[in-house]
Image (cartoon, helix red, strand yellow):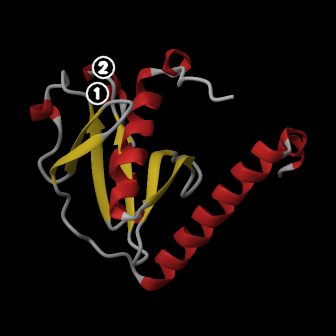
Amino acid sequence: MNLPDDLSRLLPGQRLQRGVSRALRQFDFVCVEELVPTPGLRVDVMALGPKGEIWIIECKSSRADFRADQKWQGYLEWCDRFFWAVDGDFPIDLLPAESGVMLADAYDAEIIRMSPDTPLAAARRKVMVQKFARHAASRLQAFRDPGVAGLIV
């Protein structure tokens, strides 16, 4: 039995994460949410492309949410491209011009400003692809066996 999507349980930022992840599939990217590239940082969406490219997308649901983010520049060294994802009511002129922008909702997203390409060094890329894979595998294992989540160190 198929149940309809219940998006009411999602917070505004989670709706943006969902739309971004859905949209990037059309470009053959796969995404994980809430990945920690290094202690003290947690990205909203990390996307891995078909050629190994790594994008980070930070979802901001309001002006206050954006202004409270003091860590975003720390994400730049962990990706090839960095984007903000916001909804249609967000004042885009607040976002730094040197970053990409996506307009998103819970169902889709559109890139309205492409981020500059700043390729990662090979060693950093390898570390990030491994983190991505382990994060995705841990999420899948916890989904299939919720009791294992407490065993993960």
- Pointer 1: what residue? 67
Give how far across and how far down residue 143 sits, in percent: 76, 43
| Foreground of the two, 62 or 38 | 62
The image position of residue 33, as x and y in percent, is 53, 45
Tell me if residue 109 comes above or below residue 74 in the rendering.
above
* Disc assigned to residue 64: 2
Cα distance between the residues tagged 2 and 1: 5 Å
The kind of secondary structure element at disc 2 is helix
- In the rendered image, the quadrant that contains the N terminus is top right
Give, as a three-letter code, the residue at label 1. Arg
Residue 152, compared with residue 4, is above or below; it is below
Toward the viewer: 119 or 40? 119
Question: For residue 28, which quarter of the picture?
Answer: bottom left
Image quarter of residue 12: top left
Residue 9 figure quarter = top right
Residue at 84 percent of width and 39 percent of height: 146
Residue 44 picture location, percent across and down: 46, 42
